[in-house]
Image (cartoon, grey):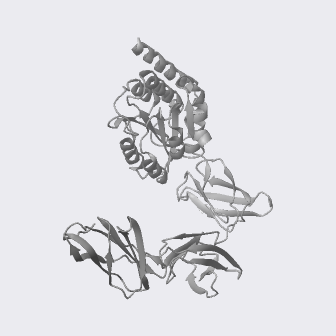
Amino acid sequence: MKSVFLRYVFLWVTLQLIAVPATVLNCCEGDILLLLDSSGSIANYEFSHLLFFAADLLRPFSLGRGHVRVGLLQVGTDPHLEFGLDVHSNQETLQSAMQGVRQLKGDTNTEEALSVALELLTETDVKVPKILLWLTDGVQPGDVDRPMSELKTRGVSVLIVSTVHGNYQVLKRVVTPPLESHLYSVDIDNIDIITEDLRKAIIEIIRAERLRVVDLTSHSAVLQWRPVLSQDSGYYELWYKSVSKPGREIRRTLTGDSSRAELKNLQPDTTYTASLRPESNQAVFNTLSVTFTTFPDVLSPAVVYLSDHGPHQIRVSWGPLQPARVQRYTVEYGAIPSSHVRTVTLSRQKNSTLLTGLEPGTQYLVTVTALQVDGKERAMSVRACTLAEALPALIDLQLEPVKQRDLEVEEMQVKWQAYQGGLRGYWIKWETEKPHSASSSMYLPPSSRSTRLTHLAPNSRVCVSPIYSSGRGDGLCCTATTHRDSSQWG
């Protein structure tokens, strides 16, 4: 019964190809790799619905090189490549192959599957948009942040469809923005309601004819497009202007082998429109357009942060680095409230320096100043604290019985050694026996190296700590055994 149902559904999907608009079929060029959760956490019912959904989602696209390539990678205990990106060049074979997919079961080893996905999507030098479409229940997705980040760094767009019981927080972290069109959490019985929206999101990424802004700052923008000309077949006309000043239009002519252009000397926080028209005697092409808004102007230093804290050093860094707009940087620092200020001058290529020779446990005021190319200055100050210096510990401590009677020690010699730099004295503490068991202590000058203690309580702990100008160092303790002719360390 289940087999008949599967065939019916896939037959219905195939028949729908007749009604597909031609404008959709030939709209796009790119690679789509389906990452299908096939583990044991997915019920047979859910697995079948995910397959039907994927088949319906992909049916409008023309397949093969120069159009859309589709691959299917299953997630289980071990990843299984059902078919690669170059296998299917038409919808008939793709739909038939998806009808024959069988669930793997087993564990959800998504991390290993993502390693295979990275290799599949980046093994070619062909510069087309690439999409990883992850179909999952989202249960125990594993440590996917790092491999997903690497995929996105390599230019792969990550889109996700999850059933409602998935780990939404993890999925939200790894999906490629915007979340509203690239991340869907839906009940499996109603999954078909997102088909059109997700297909539109995919088309937006792999649409062949479009002008994209791939890098944007406050003063520049980089445009990119799918090349449709060669160096000998024509050229591109590019023009752009500010929306608020439509009369000032800038035009450029680009060679036919161009696929990107950088627009410079733009105004910050300004909306621009840019248009690109391929010119050729061999064919007529549409004019592509894009609208974008530059970032607000940010002058360095806009942020100052501290790291590598130590008793005698602090690293100060700042950003953004703007070598084209800054002549040099000056870092001034001084202890608070001291009036003595030290200065470090750095080139415009530097955005970090290590301040050394500082006093431990001290608060400093650090000011970073940028001298701009127009002669103006911009400064930012922060407060920084060095770490307190670790005080030297006592080097050695020994107890020796001096006077004893009837196997009872009446007097104990205490000897010690310590570092002498900055030493102010010693603090000694022990337990006495008479008149009743109590704790006693005394302070000795830095010249002392030993002392004698009497009337020690049985098994008394004797502790000696060095005292320095900035505090007490770590001491040592020994247990004095008074009931026999011996002493021992504790």
Q: Which residue is drawn at the image coordinates 59% and 86% (left, top)?
A: 343
Q: Give the quarter of the figure containing the C terminus.
A: bottom left
Nearer to me, 47 or 366 = 366
Nearer to me, 155 or 344 = 344
What percent of the width, then of the height, locates residue 237? 65, 58
Q: Which residue is drawn at the image coordinates 45% and 36% (left, top)?
A: 34
Would residue 168 be found to the left or right of residue 419 on screen?
A: right
- The image quarter containing residue 117 is top left
Above or below residue 369? Residue 186 is: above
What percent of the width, then of the height, locates residue 377? 69, 79
**Does residue 27 appear in the picture of this structure?**
no
Would residue 161 be found to the left or right of residue 401 on screen?
A: right
Above or below residue 243? Residue 329 is: below
Residue extending furthest top? 1
What percent of the width, then of the height, locates residue 265? 68, 68
Nearer to me, 201 or 187 = 187
What percent of the width, then of the height, locates residue 452? 31, 80
Above or below residue 71? Residue 361 is: below
